[in-house]
Image (cartoon, rainbow, N blue to C red):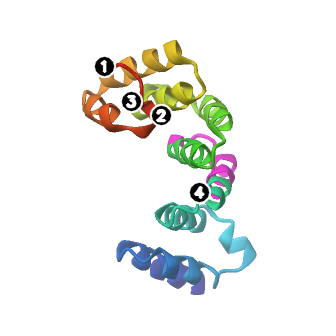
Amino acid sequence: MLAKQVIRAATGWLELGMPDDALEELKGLSFEERSERKALELKLAAEMAKMYWQQASETALELCELVADEPDFFLSAAYCLHEVGMTLEARSCLHRGPSVLQELPVFHYNMACYLWNLDEKDAAKAHLDIAIGMDDSFLESARSDKDLVGMNI
C-alpha cells in the first residue's frame, strides 16, 4: 500500500512541475520497488525534467532492458546519451530498439540529428527526409534545431 501512495505522490509532484519533490518521494520506496517499471518511468521523467542527462540515460537504459519492446524508452535513452556527448552510443541505442521504432517519424528525426553530429551527412539527410515525409511538422523543427546546424533544409 505504501508503494502505491509513493507512486501517486511522485506522479502528483511531476504533474505540478516539481521534479525535485518527485525524486525525493521515490526515495521512500524499497530497492525492489524502485526497480519496478512505474517507479523507473517516474524517475526518468523527473531526471529529464531536471536535465540530469547522465542519470536519465542510466534510468532509460534500465527501462530498455526491463521492457525491450517499448520504443519510447529507447528514444529517451538515446536522447539522453546524445545530450551527454555520447552520440555514437545514442545511435547504437536506437538501432538496438524494437523494429517498430523505424515506423516513427521521431526515430528518423533523432537519427538525422545523431548522424549529422557524427559527420554522416548523407545518411542524416536521408533520415530527415523520411521524418518530414512521415510528419511535415518536423520541417519547422529541423530549421531551428541546434543539432542540424549547417544542413541545407
Q: Which residue lies under the disc numbered 4?
A: 53
Residue at screen point 60% across, 61% down: 37
The amino acid type found where label 1 is placed reads Gly
Residue 88 is marked as none
User: Whole-Å distance between the Cαs marked 1 and 3?
Assistant: 8 Å
Residue 133 is marked as 1
Question: Was residue 70 drawn as part of the magenta stretch in this picture?
Answer: yes
As drawn, 65 above or below 151: below
The amino acid type found where label 2 is placed reads Asn
Front-lying residue, 136 or 33 = 136
> How far across and how far down the image is residue 142, in percent?
34, 32
The amino acid type found where label 3 is placed reads Pro
User: Whole-Å distance between the Cαs marked 2 and 1?
Assistant: 14 Å
Numbered range of the magenta stretch: 59-71
> How far across and how far down the image is residue 51, in percent?
52, 61
Quarter of the image containing the C terminus? Answer: top left
Q: Earlier in the sequence, mark 4 or mark 1?
A: 4
Question: Was residue 61 drawn as part of the magenta stretch in this picture?
Answer: yes
Label 4 Cα neighbours within 10 Å, binned few <14 / some 14-19 / many ≥20: many
Q: Earlier in the sequence, mark 2 or mark 4?
A: 4
Secondary structure under the numbered disc 4 in the rendered image: helix
Task: Please say if the residues under marks 2 and 4 sit with CB atoms less than 8 Å apart.
Answer: no
Q: Which residue lies under the disc numbered 2?
A: 110
User: Whole-Å distance between the Cαs marked 3 and 4?
Assistant: 23 Å
Q: Which residue lies under the disc numbered 3?
A: 105
Residue at screen point 67% across, 51% down: 66
Q: Earlier in the sequence, mark 3 or mark 4?
A: 4
